[in-house]
Amino acid sequence: MDSGIKGAPLAAATASGAAGGAPFIRIEDVSKSFGSFQAVRNVSLQITKGEIFALLGGSGCGKTTLLRMLAGFETPTSGRIFIDGQDMTGIPAYERPVNMMFQSYALFPHMSVEKNIGYGLKHDRMTDAQRKDRVREMLDLVQLTPFAHRKPHQISGGQRQRVALARALARQPKLLLLDEPLAALDKKLREHTQFELTNIQHKTGVTFVVVTHDQEEAMILSDRMAVMDKGRVMQVGSPTDIYEFPDSRFVAGFIGSITFFEARVRSVSGATALVEVPAMQTCVTARAVPGLAEGALVTLALRPEKITLSRARPEAANAFSGVVHDLGYFGKDSLYKIALPDGTTVSVNSVNARRSGESGRVAVWEDAVWLSFEPDAAILLTA
Ligand SMILES: Nc1ncnc2c1ncn2[C@@H]1O[C@H](COP(=O)(O)OP(=O)(O)OP(=O)(O)O)[C@@H](O)[C@H]1O
Ligand SMILES: [Mg+2]
């Protein structure tokens, strides 16, 4: 048995995966029912070796159930799962090249940090010296060497999380499944730990599948993510794909803030479409998407940071007007709620790039303002 995680396989792993090598995990049309209730519906996913892949979705959408099927704690009702080319049907959890880190961490309170990390190695065929080496390596990896002899109650929540991570990685799984790994931490510690988790993953090159219901966490942690709803995968992509190019109202609305407008397609010419937006009392141009038919009803979606506010009518491709209905000042930026004539409220985020007092603001309550946006900034949705 080799002496453990030595780092650096990530680049190689990512390259081979990205170069179109066989996916490391293949989930093929997997469904899971509990009685008459379908918790996971026809999910197909491919996950590359060395990736951090997030499963993101609201409570009860089937994330944990999907993770448990990967681990072998749950059997799919239909469909198949392949890990590293091997069909997992009928393979019990303990024979899979997989480890799972549970939300509660489940550390042994009476054992030291060191003993907790080494616990999983007990039944592996290793000499005492090899086991010691591996534990030392893991302590170093999660930067807990000075705490090796402490008990779990003598370290912080973030440190406990790292002990659980080290224990899960000690047996060198090819795949680590993490169910809400940061949920027990407070906000500040969570942000810090997100970066640590990605660092550790990069050092080891182990493929991580992380379940979270926190959108920002999925964005920060993952190379790619699947957004789930009611047991289905709605969209798969990089954080940028998901945020900037959502392909449904559900995904667009699930991540970040956004305003939806009903619109009708007037014409499509090459990469742009002309759409009529009754709430804006005008026609606007937007980046075309596949499947736009002339005359069809679609949704136009705009994120708050993509809209520019001005007092005077701007010379922009797309402009419409409204009245400041509400205004929140957050220091680095301000959030405006603009009311349109038909009652639609549009959120606009404006960065306070210059130092100025209240007199320097673009607008205050009840001011009439212009809103403008680039054609590329508008998201057209047909689903
Ligand atoms: N053993 C079970 N028997 C019956 N129903 C179950 C079982 N396990 C899960 N479910 C149901 O399946 C659905 C999906 O559950 P799952 O635990 O996968 O959700 P989740 O996405 O992880 O949610 P959360 O974010 O709240 O943890 C839920 O409606 C849940 O009640
Ligand atoms: Mg869950």
Image (spheres, rainbow, N blue to C red):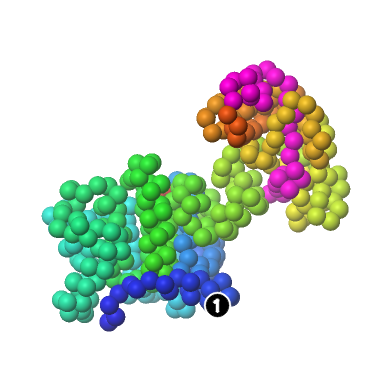
Between 134 and 247, the one nearer to me in the picture: 134
Vertical relation: 279 (above or below) 177: above
Q: Please tell me whether residue 375 belongs to the stretch shown in magenta.
A: yes
Residue range (magenta): 356-383
Q: Percent from the top left, x then y, of residue 47? A: 51, 67
- Residue 116 relative to residue 222: left or right: left
Q: Percent from the top left, x then y, of residue 309? A: 70, 31
Q: Quadrant of the N terminus?
A: bottom left
Give amino acid for label 1: Gly
- Residue 128 relative to residue 242: left or right: left
Q: Which residue is mark 1?
A: 21
Among all residues in the image, which is located at the extreme left?
110
Vertical relation: 282 (above or below) 114: above
* Badge 1 residue CB within 8 Å of ligand 1: no
Vertical relation: 198 (above or below) 372: below
Q: Please tell me whether residue 239 belongs to the stretch shown in magenta.
A: no
